[in-house]
Amino acid sequence: MIRNITQKERISAFRDKRFIILGSIILVLLLTAAATGIINYRVLAAERKLAQSTATENFNNQPDRHPHRVAHYGSYAFRPKSVLSFLDFGLDSYTGTMVYLEAHQQNSANFSQVQQSGAMIRFGEMTIAFVMQWLIPLLIIFLCFNTFTLEHEEGTLKVLLSQGVSLKAIAKAKLLGYIQVISMIVLPAFFFVFLFVLSINDFILDSSLLLRTAVFMLTYLLYFFIFIAGSILISALNKHSRTALVTLLGIWIFSIVLMPKALSNLGSSLHEEPSKAAMDASVHEESKNGIDGHDPMDKRLEQFKQGLLEKYQVDSLSQLPVNVDGLIMALGEESSSKIYQEHFDELVAIYDDQNRLSIWAGFINPYLAIRNISMSMAGTDFFHYVDFLNAAEKYRYALTQHLNNLQATKVAHKDKTSRLKADIYASYPPFYYEGPAFTKALANVSLSIIALAFWTALVYGLIIITMNKKKNLI
Amino acid sequence: MQIILEAEGLSKTYGEKTALNALHLKLSKGEIFSLLGPNGAGKSTTINLFLGFIQPSAGAARINGVDASKDPVGVKQHLAYIPEQVMLYQNLSGRENLSLLSALAGFEYSQSALDQFLVEAGLQADAINKRVGSYSKGMRQKVGIAAAVAKNAKVLLLDEPTSGLDPKASNEFSELLLRLSAAGTTIFMATHDIFRAREVSQRIGIMKAGSLIDEINAAKLNAGELEQLYLDYMKG
């Protein structure tokens, strides 16, 4: 019984010229977005790989230098493009792609795509995520808004019901029919994406990539289900197609256009982040005066030097078996890095508070839930960005301390002219970054997944309750 | 005598307005009963109550012993329904519509069997495979008749079934009803067509303002007498 109505919905949809035109446009957009996303990924990934290897090469091929010169010569950390970033650019276009790594200084990531592109990029980019988050819900609305109202208006519902079918069965069949119709548009694009993901590593299975892709696709299917079921529900609750369409379009505009922007503004107002200049000034001030402001650096240095003299049982710094300058540099680096990291963690906590608002709002608006999951699985969300910044800072700190250690052990006290052989520096491992594991990314969006599951159960439950409650069927 | 269709004190009110007032009616197997009355008399309300589309305010509507308000899905296994305007899916052909409706009623027919039902209902063979969007009202009505016959139901509920049919089709429809009745199908027909009602029915009910005001043995009156009686009731 359900099968027959499902088949009828499918046939009707594919005989509807308006749907065929809209559906074809969406399919073409999806495939185009996938293709351009893949090309974009390949170009950017190659650029960054080349930039990273050039930076490493330059570092390795530098002339013989004093370790502290090398520490200031520095290096570069380029954020590798996440393979799945072609699905959802997320924050990638707005976040920096390169961090200059040098001693004493934690530089921010620079060279975002927005900085290098024209104003058009601010209108958003055509990605698979954009088509699936914005346009497919619209297609679903146009497909389903009159699913019950038209039956009412044209009198076919009465004919259907008189055959001995329950309203609940009709609703389930329609749900199934529309799922099949939407799947026919989405699945070719998913197949294309899947083939690309497989081809990345020459068709050698990468479980992390496959799992991310699977979660990406499955959660989008849930998102579409929510819109299909929601549209059917609204159609069942309204008597006229026009009212159902206006209601659904209103929900679409509120959920996808207005609410995310309003939440973003609300988040910034509730949890205001310090400016970059203010944060740099605080780090500088605390490094200079000590963390609590009562422990000046000079005093700590004196204590440190005195401690060394006592430890090595010598009278002057020049008698020490190690170069005290290197040790002082290491101490300063440790102190300033600790201060910076505390400020950075505080800043990240503020951004997390802002983001938490939209994560919880996923229980009010499924678009916010899928947006979080989508960016996370694509590796383009804030969590992935911060992970890269932390990795870059970790490398910078380790490299700087390595160079301070070279100065302390290989260069004499107050010797500022000696140079160490370049191959000593070249032996230091280059910056290598691999994004967070799938499980970490999944855990980070677990609440959004729960929100999406909640919505799925809610709309389906509401359909069943509504259909069971309808006593007067016409 | 086996009672197939029964209304027992069946009433329906909408706020202050009484759409149907304590209808008592019993139809036996193979009987054809026509309900005459002006628009708003309660004819369609009665049919909708038997279909379980609306809940009665009092009383019960039973078909083959199944209470329509308590088991609105189950009761439809025993009945077929033809409304005044058979509304079908415009994107599907006549055959596809019939196939869908039969399948929903639990009958899967071959393509040739479906075509036979449609032709027997009077649809031209060359129209069977065309989309219903291009059908006239009469052609849609014929698909509805075919669906009702294909359902092989014990009871046929008809709401102005000949409205929109040309005289020839209307005559063929009357013949079909008599054939179905002879085969044991009980038929309940709401209609304005006094002559058609007298031609096919054993009993005729006259309804006014929600109440069944008279029940007539169709064989005892000719068409003219019946018309006069009906008009007298409507004046009074």
Image (cartoon, coloured by chain):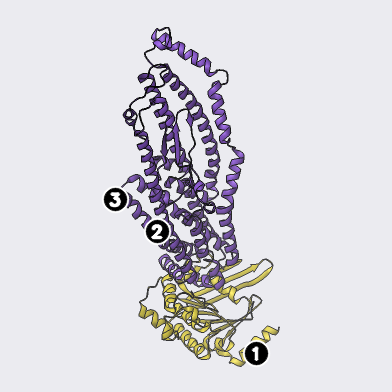
Chain colours: A purple, B yellow
Where in the figure is residue A27, as x and y percent of width and height?
A: 43, 62
Task: Provide the residue designation for mark 3.
Answer: A202
The residue nearer to you, when weighing A81 against A350, is A81
Please report, as a chain letter, where disc 3 is located: A
* Eye-nearest disc, 2 or 1: 2
Where is residue A80, by image quadrant? top left
Q: Residue furthest right?
A: B236
- C-alpha distance separating marks 3 and 2: 20 Å
Seen in the picture, residue B137 relative to A52 is either above or below; the reply is below
Where in the figure is residue A179, as x and y percent of width and height?
A: 44, 61
- C-alpha distance separating marks 2 and 1: 71 Å
Name the amino acid, label 3: Asp
Q: Looking at the image, is mark 3 or mark 2 earlier in the sequence?
A: 2
Name the amino acid, label 2: Ala
- Number of disc labels: 3
Task: Provide the residue designation for mark 1.
Answer: B228
Q: Are marks 2 and 1 on the same chain?
A: no
Q: Which mark is residue A189?
A: 2
Please report, as a chain letter, where disc 1 is located: B
Residue B70 visible in the current orientation: no
